[in-house]
Image (spheres, rainbow, N blue to C red):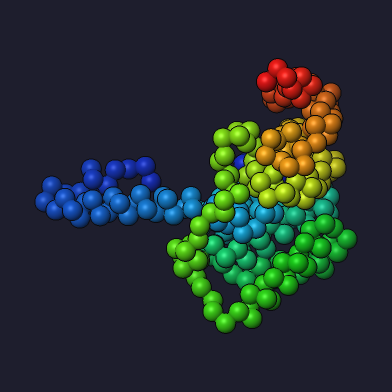
Amino acid sequence: MPFARLLPLVIGASLLGACAPTTPLFIAQVTTNELVEYKALKTKRMTAAIEDEGDLLTYSAMAIRDAHSDKAEMLYLEGYRDRQLSGEVRAIALYQIGLIYMNRFNEQRDDAKALNYFYQVLNEFPATQAASRSEARIELIRQRGDEPIHKTSRELLAHWQPSDNLDLYKPSLDPDMTLLSRRAVLKGRVEEAEQLYLLGLADPHVPADIKEKALYQLALMHMAADNPRADRDKAIAYLRRLLVQYPNGELNAKAARHLDLALNPTQR
């Protein structure tokens, strides 16, 4: 999967059937329940990770959920090494790795590694948006290091409860919204998410289909009913830009429908 496609991203076997006939049924049930609990834990872990850190891209959150931090690190490093991409986008690649490794709900958490990546952003891309955000994360890691009690990710997750205002799968949210867009709307951080999407739009080497998706996400955030600072004019502008710049894009029909709704809200 090419790195540029990550910017706006996004054990099926029955254990009962695998048990020997002589296996006591209660053992099979315990094993099955453990599998169910593991699946629930993975979903809970991703939600907790996103609530803990709003800048996580969907791919980064999924890497934490699936314990694939190393795979995500390798893929983001491909983007960092691609000198055709702008400094802003290359800095985001390093920044995302740092966010993954510092996340408190990541079983592969490694604050030292996270700090190295954040300092790399500061040293190599000091004028980028990712640099200012890296500084804030460095300070947060230092503050956590001074805490008297350090809990593991599993201990934190065992007592974690989702915030009342962060139902990422709220029915009123458009099903096409990315996790980044959803959290931004629910937590009042649309402006910050907008900056990330705009960085992709500004980079001449980011593929056209990714820019189309970025425009679509920008429009969805600004027209979301759950956005207390929804901006209908901005949403319309982004949708019109998408339709003009990508008339044959895969999101053309959806964008046209959303534009019609934005222009004629009484027809909902």
Give coordinates of residue 184: x percent, y percent. Answer: 70, 47
Name the side, left or right, on which 225 lies relative to 42. Answer: right
For residue 89, above or below residue 240: below
- Give the residue furthest to the right: 127
For residue 174, above or below residue 147: above
Q: Nearer the viewer, residue 145 or 11?
A: 145
Residue at figure coordinates x 77%, y 42% from the top left: 229
Using the rendered view, name the quadrant where residue 127 is placed: bottom right
Using the rendered view, name the quadrant where residue 17 is placed: top left
Residue at figure coordinates x 45%, y 63% from the top left: 158
Give coordinates of residue 179: x percent, y percent. Answer: 63, 44
Using the rendered view, name the quadrant where residue 207 is placed: top right
Tell me the quadrant of the picture where the C terminus can be found: top right
Name the side, left or right, on which 216 lies relative to 177. Answer: right
Name the side, left or right, on which 133 lies relative to 104. Answer: right
Residue at figure coordinates x 54%, y 62% from the top left: 105
Give coordinates of residue 6: x percent, y percent. Answer: 67, 45
Name the side, left or right, on which 245 lies relative to 177. Answer: right
Q: Nearer the viewer, residue 210 or 251?
A: 251
- Give the residue furthest to the left: 22
| Residue 96 visible somewhere in the drawing | yes
For residue 159, above or below residue 260: below
| Residue 82 visible somewhere in the drawing | no
Q: Nearer the viewer, residue 57 or 168?
A: 168
Give coordinates of residue 223: x percent, y percent. Answer: 74, 33
